[in-house]
Image (cartoon, helix red, strand yellow):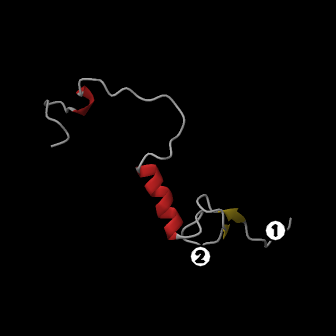
């Protein structure tokens, strides 16, 4: 069985540039750290979302209390 020496090339999800899938390419699948950070910023600003139903957060915060009734968040 022979293996191909061809390097896998993917497109950067942000700008569409060709990106070689190699150990040296530290930002993969992005072409650069800049494109990686742009994508992260879009997720953080909720410009990108995964489709689905929203979760309800209208409970009494019982999930955030430990056995002694103290909040985990001080």
Residue 53 x/y as whole percent: 49, 28
41 and 59: which is toward the camera: 41
How many other residues sit within 10 Å of disc 1, few (<14), some (14-19) or many (≥20)? few
| The N terminus - image quarter | bottom right
Across and down, in percent, residue 67 comes to 18, 30
Quarter of image, res 20: bottom right
Could you tell me which quadrant the C terminus lies in? top left
State the image quarter where residue 7 is shown. Answer: bottom right
Q: Residue furthest bottom?
A: 24
SS under mark 1: loop
The residue where tag 1 is placed is 3
Q: Residue 64: image x %, image y %?
A: 24, 33
Task: Looking at the picture, tell me which residue is in the foreground, 13 or 1.
Answer: 13
Q: Residues within 10 Å of mark 2 (few under 14, many from 20)?
A: few
Q: Residue at 58% of width from left, 64% of height from top?
A: 30
Looking at the rendered structure, the secondary structure element under dot 2 is loop
Identify the residue at horizontal 73%, vertical 66% (top origin).
Answer: 8
Q: Position of residue 26 (x, y in %)?
A: 54, 71
Rendered image: mark on residue 24: 2
Query: Is residue 63 found left or right of 50 in the rendered image?
Result: left
Locate residue 61: give its quadrant.
top left
Q: Earlier in the sequence, mark 2 or mark 1?
A: 1
The furthest residue to the right: 1
Distance from label 2 to label 1 (Cα)? 20 Å
Front position among marks 2 and 1:
2
């Amino acid at each position: 069985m022979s293996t191909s020496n061809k390097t896998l090339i993917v497109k950067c999800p942000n700008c569409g540039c060709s990106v070689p899938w190699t150990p040296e390419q530290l930002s993969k699948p992005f072409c650069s750290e800049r494109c990686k950070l742009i994508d992260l910023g879009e997720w953080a600003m909720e410009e990108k979302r995964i489709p689905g139903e929203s979760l309800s957060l209208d409970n009494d915060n019982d999930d955030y209390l430990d056995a002694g009734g103290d909040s985990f968040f001080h």
